[in-house]
Amino acid sequence: MTDLEPSAATMTTLRFHNYGEPADVLRLEQAPIPDPGSGRVRIRVHACGLNPADWALCRGLFAGDLPRGIGLEVSGPVDAVGAEVTDVGVGDHVLGTADYAGCASAGASDYAIMDHWTPVPAGLDLIQAAALPMAVETAFRSLENLDVGANQTILIHAAGTTVGFAAVQIALIRGATVIATAGETFADRLRGFGAKVTSYGNGMVDRVIDIAGGAIDLVLDTAPASGVLPDLISIAGGDPRHVLTITDFEAASQLGARSSLGEDATLRHDVLGEFAQLALERRFTVPVARSFGLEDWRAALDVSQSGQAHGKLVILPGRASSAG
């Protein structure tokens, strides 16, 4: 039997057995279907959202026992329930996070063990549900750490990323005035939410300050590390403690800005249900750019690493790729 020939007790999963570049170390193979331990549930994966963090795991982020899978956010029907789980049962549809650290596979699989979940509201598409967890949790926690509220003006830099897109909406819900930097792909949608949008590049500092009528109270940087942190500090009136980045950790350390590595790391999975309901009511969204069958993971990797995804990329185990 080859690695990809299934048996009754195995599943197809995407995982790595050593660390390195994702294209080199990831393997699509057969593996035992995992059993849920205490406080865990197993789902048959309908959809799995992909994130830059998946590729970082391949390179050694949060290193641990191998093999290890990728795919940190999932949705699908509960297939089995571990001990001490009382809030969901077999057949219930849930969304949340895959237990990538405690299992030899993760969300990019036919089945996944979940460590945090919330029910999918009836009527919410399961692909849309799988796009929510990482963007919502990261954006909400970052805004909480910045203590964003009403009567404040915040710049969300790189609002076209899924975290930035979520952060704009959450900051507006919290009553803040939001200025966003974004490309043309999402500029009109961000304006539709109520944000004031400007472009990246030369003159960004002057454009943002002009829109705000002065220095910005707070800045959240969600862009891939790009050397722009000094400009963001300037936009915040020169005070680096008013700037928080979720990506450019080295520059933040050098310049005295805040980074998600140094903030309260308490994960906010408790808010996923609230935002799933808002998504059902079309009052919140994370854009899905394209879906891929599990066997087409290399194409998903290429799109992700190109920086031109323009929204969430989603793996659909057992299904074909689509334009999304």
Image (spheres, rainbow, N blue to C red):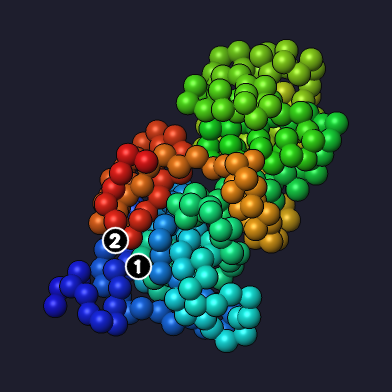
Q: Residue at x 60, y 13 (%)?
A: 203
Where's the C terminus, which quadrant? top left
Residue 248 at x, y = what percent? 58, 40
Q: Looking at the image, can residue 131 be seen?
A: yes
Outermost residue to the left: 1
Residue 213, above or below 123? above
Q: Looking at the image, can residue 234 be seen?
A: no
Q: Give the structural element (helix, strand or loop) at label 1.
A: loop
Image label count:
2
Alpha-carbon span between mark 2 and mark 1: 7 Å
Q: Residue at x 20, y 69 (%)?
A: 4
Q: Amino acid at mark 1?
A: Asp
Where's the N terminus, which quadrant? bottom left
Label 1: few (<14), some or many (≥20) within 10 Å? many
Residue 69, above or below 165? below
Q: Residue at x 59, y 67 (%)?
A: 116
Label 2: few (<14), some or many (≥20) within 10 Å? some
Residue, disc 1: 110
Q: Residue at x 46, y 39 (%)?
A: 311
Residue, disc 2: 318
Q: Amino acid at mark 2?
A: Gly
Residue 211 at x, y = what percent? 72, 15
